[in-house]
Amino acid sequence: MTEPRSVPRSDRSPWNWLLIIPIAVPLLTPLYNMDSPRLWGFPAFYWLQFAFILIGVTTTSIVYQMTHRRAVSPSPAASTSPSEAGDE
Amino acid sequence: MSDHIVEIVVFSVLFLLVSGMGFVAAKWRAPKDMAHLDEWGLGGRSFGGWITWFLVGGDLYTAYTFVAVPALIFGAGAAGFFAVPYTIIVYPIFFLILIRLWSVSHRHGFVTPADFVRTRFGSPTLALLVAITGIVATMPYIALQLVGIEAVLKTMGVTGDSALARHAPIIVAFAILAAYTYQSGLRAPALIAFVKDTLIYIVIIVAVLYLPYKLGGWGTIFDDASAKFAASPAPGDGITLNTNNQLQYITLALGSALALFLYPHSITGVLASKSRNTIKRNMSALPAYSFLLGLIALLGYMAISAGVKPLPGAKAGSVDSNTVVPLLFDQQFPSWFAGVAFAAIGIGALVPAAIMSIAAANLFTRNIYKEYFRRDATPAQEATVSKIASLVVKVGAVAFIIFLDPQFSIDLQLIGGIIILQTAPSVGLGLFTRWFHRGGLMAGWAAGMGLGMWMLYSIPNAATGRKHFGGSAFPLSDFGFDTPRTIYVGFIAVLVNLVVAVIATLILRALKTPDGIDGTRPDDFFADEGDPRLETARTTPDAVGSST
């Protein structure tokens, strides 16, 4: 399948593992399922989950910053053969 | 009705203004040739960061969400807040998975997730299953947008005695929507989304600053809610979770996030963006909407604190809890501002309804019409078929609401989330591995569907006295476990789907059953904007010209 002349690019990056955090943390209910301490009247259950949004923003921003440059480098070899020819 | 005249005027003016924008949208970023499915159905695959942000945000956070999530919080408390973790975990998932779908679709010119499945697994039949699943899951979702508008109309007192009079405003609204979607395609919701989201942000920011001040502070609001739940006989409610519904909360959040990225309308929004970087950047900016959604959810508690009583439902003795947020605005704000809030919800229904109908129409065109009726359809013919199909889909959605109990649409949407999850192994895992046999995926799909349906059918709802389709929380005791805990149906169904797919794949491989040919190459999954193979893969040069 893979031809030797095509330079396989990849979107693999160790930084992607960072995205486990915003996926896993909001699913760990024991971390935040309580009323106190309250913040501005918000029970912990609510303000902590709002805080998790910030964790999500931070981690995705970091991963984007660390990975987006690599994708720009063009691959000069991959310019032939219509790819849908192998269909069916 | 006269009490609400200011609200109705503000609502109508904003609604008509936005409708005008919908028609003008055809000329916005106009392509050389609109008669191409890439143009009508994907906006030329050219949307940059800002447009994508508004489009996907307007797409995922629907009017129904804005009405139903606070209604859930109003009724059950903390369990309804699952929408927040759900919309946190969805973006890393998009970031890791949908980005690959964008790349492979960019290179091959795929318009729908089923297009990808067809090429990846060499199986039009599997693609057909994915397409039908997508259409069936999307239809009731569109109908639910109408439920959102209807909650607003009801609060404004726009009701009639006969079924036709009651639904006349919705029919008019949807006729306008259908007309400009037909003309402008995906450009219409993309342009309208700017107005919709600006209105919603303004309304919610004002509401969350003003209402707590008026109701005695956030602490009082939560205490009032807590007191209400303590007094109610229902076992599962409260402002925090209890031991029995935590597993449900987690699996519902995760399952909903996985379902969301499989819904055809989310995929349409993502495929319309112009590059991988646009998508990745958006995944860090879209959680702004999750913040908004969290605040909207808390309107449910404010409604408790303000003593809102929901309007009566369609059946005698029932209440329509979807009216709590519109009523809260009606009672707490000057009528002109309530009118703006209602317009935000009404317009909020139009954006997702347009995108969903386009997504369903694209599925029909690409994976049913072109596959089975007209193999040699040109892109212009595809665009025409899709435009007509989008009309049919909208008429169908209106018919759902007029002729059937709205509860039926809500049930179907519940089912929709679970059935769309059954495409996860083909679409989601298919982006990473070709290990599965096409027959295995079909077997898994069938098993997941069957089990999911059975589980939903067996869930009663004590609050409404219904015996079947009472919710998505399945008691584990029904599987023979000695526990009162519940779990999200979709989660179990998709696990069974996976197990069956794995076993069937092993069997089919052992029997040397022919597998389809994989039409993709490993580097297809990393292709980016300006990819050199793009031009050879596309059917017409027009689309390429307009995407630069």
Image (cartoon, rainbow, N blue to C red):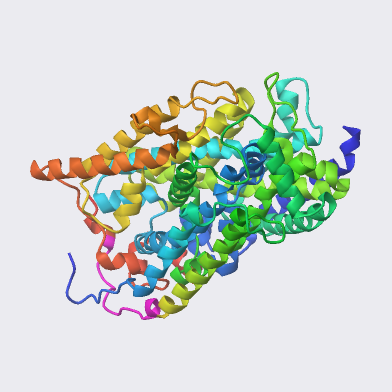
As drawn, the residue found furthest toward the left would be B511
x, y percent for residue A36? 63, 56
x, y percent for residue B405? 61, 24
x, y percent for residue B356? 53, 45
Is residue B13 visible to us here? no
Is residue B483 visible to us here? yes
Which residue is rendered at x = 52% and y = 36% of the image? B413
For residue B229, what is the image quadrant?
A: top right
Which residue is rendered at x = 33% and y = 63% of the image? B537
Nearest the viewer among B527 and B38 is: B527
Which residue is rendered at x = 62% and y = 50% of the image? B351
Q: Compared with residue B251, is residue A3 higher up or lower down, i.e. above or below?
A: below
**Residue B547 painted magenta:** no
Task: Say whether residue A41 is left or right of residue A70.
Answer: right
As drawn, the residue found furthest toward the front would be A36
Which residue is rendered at x = 22% and y = 41% of the image? B439
**Residue A80 painted magenta:** yes
> Magenta region: which residues?
A70-83
